[in-house]
Image (cartoon, rainbow, N blue to C red):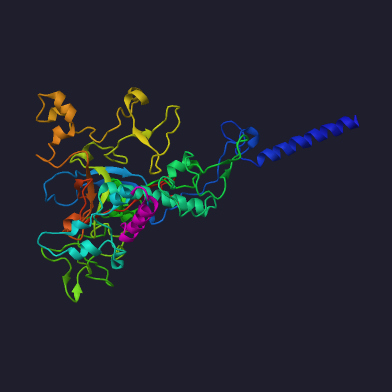
Amino acid sequence: MKNRGNKIIFVGMLAIAAIFSSCSKERSGATGWNYNDPQNGGFQKVPYLEQETGPGLVLIEGGRFTIGRVEQEITYDWNNIPRTVTVSSFYMDEVEVTNGHYLEYLYWLKRTYVDYPEVYKKALPDTLVWRKELAYNEPYVELYLRHRAYWDYPVVGVNWLQATDFCAWRTDRVNEFILIREGLFDWYPNQMNEDNFNTEAYLVGQYESGKRVDGLPDLDPNKEFRNVRMEDGILLPKYRLPTEAEWEYAAYGLIGNTIDELIVERKLYPWNGHAVRNSDEKYIGQILANFKRGRGDNMGVAAKLNDNADITAPVYAYWPNDYGLYNMAGNVSEWVMDVYRPLTFEDAQDFRPFRGNVFKTKLLDEEGLIAEKDSLGHIQYREVNAEMDNLAERRNYRQADNINYLDGDWESTMYYNDPDYAKEKGTEAMYQYTKTSMVNDKVRVYKGGSWRDRAYWMVPGTRRFLEETQATEYIGFRCAMTRVGSPVGLGY
């Protein structure tokens, strides 16, 4: 009887030990199985605190605002109808991308793509944008991009496609640095041609060069190590251009004009008030941005230059708005992601509005695996289509290219009596590109005033457009990044 009692006590102690042992691991609220336990398959729940703020970025807490016109419509385009929309929280560069940043990019391309010099040439800004038939601007052609004096000035002569490529390159360099910082990779300066770090190629297991260790310990009992996954929260989302709604929202900086849920003053510019001079007693009368005051007046009178800049100015030259963003008015206009349409704000969603979606998916090989990366080291994509992706069964979209969605119907064109031709030509038939308008599916929006613009264009609600392959001496850009998780960060 005594032995039986000891046996019961022993079994009970084993049970208690097992309970305490299982309590050391977090359990699934759905199945009761342990997370991070190789004994039951090793499904992982990694520790996570917060999204890291990428280099150069500041958090833009989202919210609702009225997008569109707040100033008199002096151009009579009627292309910025006021509308209340909501923008999610996101990150944005505090300054415009500078010549220094872009030279770093060019240096990397030239050093890496040794056998593909066309990649470097494709990325070169068009320095000839400075030329005018009746002005002497050759010094800017020769010196503005590369001279050390202009290192902290915004890069110009960059078209929309080049700006987008820069964002992709920046994503890879930042994520590569994170992996080096975390001890998973070594510095690998000898990357060449397709053997260069690409975030997507690494995530799908198609990049191994430069690894310091085999990877993270894998709790799957059948594996030993694994690559970092996006689910781990270590790597950052993509750098990209901001959407038009994001840019306009960030420019106003209404976070500084809000008491509880009341916006106490509707801003005209990124600063309070309706004037372009500083009203602070310490800086009273000083110009708040770099713009053109009038015909022939780019900077004022010697000994008291009003904005201290004849063309562009250093990116930290003026006061930031309430989000901490510099030059959201003046200096250079900036590319955004959107394709231009006059009536986008009538049709777009009121949550995260954007026009320009072309839905894609990773290209697969004959065995159904992700196809090998291309000659530049990038993962290959294709547009979704009705046959391969069962779009007929979807309710939220039915085609890949949605740039022209709710716009450009054939019945509204001059070819309404020839529907086959109108449908074939699409936007070309609707807008008569180069004949009656300059609008097509390759025309992108740019926002904000520049050094050569009057104050009217510094109102964030104004909008203009240019072909994505074109560049000017007054358009630059800054990058943005999607915010994941809580919209307010650690303050939540």
Residue at the outermost bottom position: 303
Residue at the outermost front position: 115
Residue 491 image position (x, y, % from top left): 45, 52
Does the rendering let one see residue 323?
A: no
Residue 125 image position (x, y, % from top left): 26, 54
Q: Nearer the viewer, residue 268 or 45?
A: 45
Residue 427 image position (x, y, % from top left): 18, 34
Q: In the figure, is residue 322 to the left or right of 291?
A: right
For residue 100, which quarter of the picture? bottom left
Does the rendering let one see residue 313?
A: yes
The residue stretch that appears in magenta: 90-116
x 29%, y 68%: residue: 149
x 27%, y 61%: residue: 145
Q: Is residue 178 highlighted in magenta?
A: no
Q: Nearer the viewer, residue 4 or 310?
A: 310
For residue 426, which quarter of the picture? top left
Q: Nearer the viewer, residue 78 or 338?
A: 338
For residue 12, which quarter of the picture? top right
Residue 375 image position (x, y, % from top left): 38, 41
Which image quadrant: the N terminus? top right
